[in-house]
Amino acid sequence: MRFSGISRVCGAPRRAVAAGLAALAVGAVVAPAPAAAAPATCQDVYLPVTLAGQQQTVFGHLCRPDRPTSTVLLLVPGATYTAEYWDLPASLGLFSFRGALNDAGYATLAVDRLGSGRSSRPASALLTAITQAGVLHQVVGRLRAEYPRVVIGGHSLGATAVIVEAATFHDVDGVLVAGIVHHPDPVDDVADFLTALYPAALDPVLARRNYDPGYLTTAPGTRARAFHSPAQPSAAVAAYEESTKDAFAAPEAADGLGVGVVSPYTILIDVPVLVALGGQDELFCSPVPLVGTDCSSSAALYAQEAPYYSPAARLRTYLLPGHYGHSFNFAPNADLFAETVVQWAGHLS
């Protein structure tokens, strides 16, 4: 089945891009800019999937580099974020992870999880990390129609679905786990995050979207504390965060945390894994011995995570230097994270 959508060339006005014959093919002629690489060619796509026997649609933003590639990264955002998390606006001084991967020669497909953004919104009771993983498995199958190598990556709650997908279906060539490790800090920070959540139906930004009571979002004014602390985003970034926030289904968190964080289900992943964390992610990092995660170094992070992965995972860990918290794609030095992913992906086999 083919993708359909609205095509555009990144960094240029929206224009027609011819549909190719392959399931994912998007054709375009892009005139190379003098002394610079041509921009990636991007297309909004709507992917038919099934959930509990019902047809749904996953929205994705597919971007292809200016040269042939055999590798695509399927990118899944976390709770209350959409595909935009991977392509933050430069106008606010933020960094595009998607753009960095395309510049390095990789294709990317950033998606909205079911229940969020422009994807279908089924009953919240149907959405768990396990069912989201089944949907991602269908997306991976479509990507395989064009790309010999598929890497799946997720941030936060999205990473829990990615873990379940890779450990269950064994259909990808690498796994990026960002913002999720096996030792959360339960003393203060997880509790603080949970108190920031309330029904999306009550939210002034989201109330008109007719969410059922099982969909949650962050209360106004809580995102800086929940996702960025100890860093303090600028007023403009905070406004962007509030205006673009989305929702997630509560059952996703229940089994996502249970399977992806508490349990050792990751031991079943049999392809290379990169685990990355913000340098001071307050949901996980803790200075208290034996409580939470030791974020003093990437080596310390590796020592805690390695028992949860098999030798086949060839585990690598990365701790973004500095003082940024959970949503570290917003960090001023987020380019260092992207560079690490590019280098890691280049050594997959």
Image: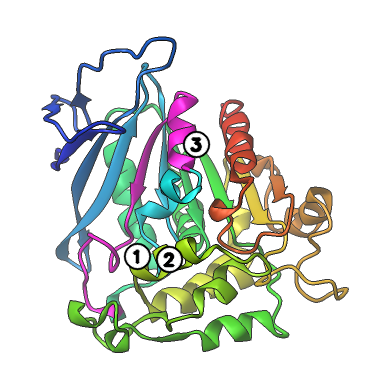
For this view, does 322 lie left or right of residue 135? right
Label 3 element class: loop
Give the residue drawn at x 23%, y 37%.
Answer: 43
Dot 2 and dot 1 residues touching (CB under 8 Å): yes
Q: Nearer the viewer, residue 89 or 134?
A: 89
The secondary structure type at the circle numbered 1 is helix
Residue under pointer 3:
173
> Which mark's residue is nearer the viewer, 2 or 3?
2
Q: Amino acid at mark 2?
A: Glu
Rendering quarter of residue 121: bottom left
Give me the residue at 50% from left, 25% from top: 104
Q: Which residues are magenta?
A: 96-124
Q: Is residue 101 magenta?
A: yes
Q: Nearer the viewer, residue 222 or 62?
A: 222
Residue 344 tag number? none
CA neighbours of label 3 inside 10 A, class few (<14), some (14 to 19), many (20+): many
Assign a secondary structure to mark 2: helix
Which residue is disc 2 drawn over?
241
Residue at the disc numbered 1? 244
In space, the residues marked 2 and 3 are separated at their CA atoms by: 32 Å
Relative to 38, residue 298 above or below = below
Task: Answer whether residue 210 is visible to the viewer in this image.
Answer: no
| Percent x, y of residue 111 | 33, 51
Three-letter code, disc 1: Thr
